[in-house]
Image: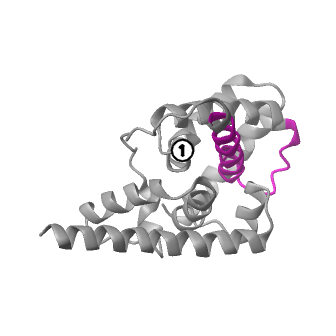
Amino acid sequence: MSQTSTDEQEQRQRELVAAARDGDREAFEELVRQTYVDTFTLAMRLTSNEEDAADVVQEAYLRAWKGLKRFRGDAAFSTWMYRITANAASSHAQKRRRTRFEPINEAVEPVDEHLAHQPELAAESAADLAALSRTLDELPPKLRSVVVLKDVYDLPHDAIAEELGISTTAAKVRLHRGRRRLRELLDEQEARAADAV
């Protein structure tokens, strides 16, 4: 997408936010349509479960609608939705840990166009990407959240810290630990595959 069309899209979103803030539900519905795929993809990455991701997205948009009057517009609406979605996913994970102890089922992931921007996690083939995705799901939620927000969504450390309610230093430490654990898991998978041959 060119810079001009990105600027135009952000301007259009600012207009929709202003209308929605004044109570225009259709404007908010249009914001949902424009940001839904990215929001769901992030929720899916953070929860590793389609049903949980759907719950998180619903909660995130509900929070966005209720909190729209507090949205200052310092960042794009889509960036604000990333923050809300990350917080909703964290709340959902805590609630789930308190109420259910079910194994996470494998779910079909939506196409994530942002994967092309992964500096640390670039995969050379579809098989590598699938293995990477499965391995990412094995990370503890705290580490997975930071790795996804940084390496998939390319958010800066301070934005990740703000979204997750942690310090910038903690975000950097979790990112380092998450990437290291991801490499360890990938190495273990490679070793098992080599032993199986």
Prevailing secondary structure class for the magenta stretch in the rendered image: helix
| Residue position marked by numbered label 1 in the rendering | 47
Residue at image coords 67%, 24%:
26
Q: Which residues are magenta?
A: 69-96
Task: Check disc 1: other Cα within 10 Å, few if <14, some if 14-19, many if 20+.
Answer: many
Secondary structure beneath label 1: helix
Give x and y (percent) for residue 102. 50, 34
Q: Nearer the viewer, residue 147 or 12?
A: 147
Q: 145 left or right of 23?
A: left
Which picture quadrant has residue 4?
bottom right
Q: Amino acid at mark 1?
A: Thr
Give x and y (percent) for residue 131. 32, 60
Q: Nearer the viewer, residue 30 or 150?
A: 150
Q: Nearer the viewer, residue 174 or 65?
A: 174
Residue at image coords 25%, 61%:
127
Q: Quadrant of the C terminus?
A: bottom left
Asked if 170 appears above or below 39 in the picture, the reply is below
Q: 181 left or right of 158?
A: left
Give x and y (percent) for residue 78. 65, 49
Number of labels in the image equals: 1
Which picture quadrant has residue 170?
bottom right
Asked if 178 appears above or below 12 in the picture, the reply is below
Asked if 182 appears above or below 136 in the picture, the reply is below
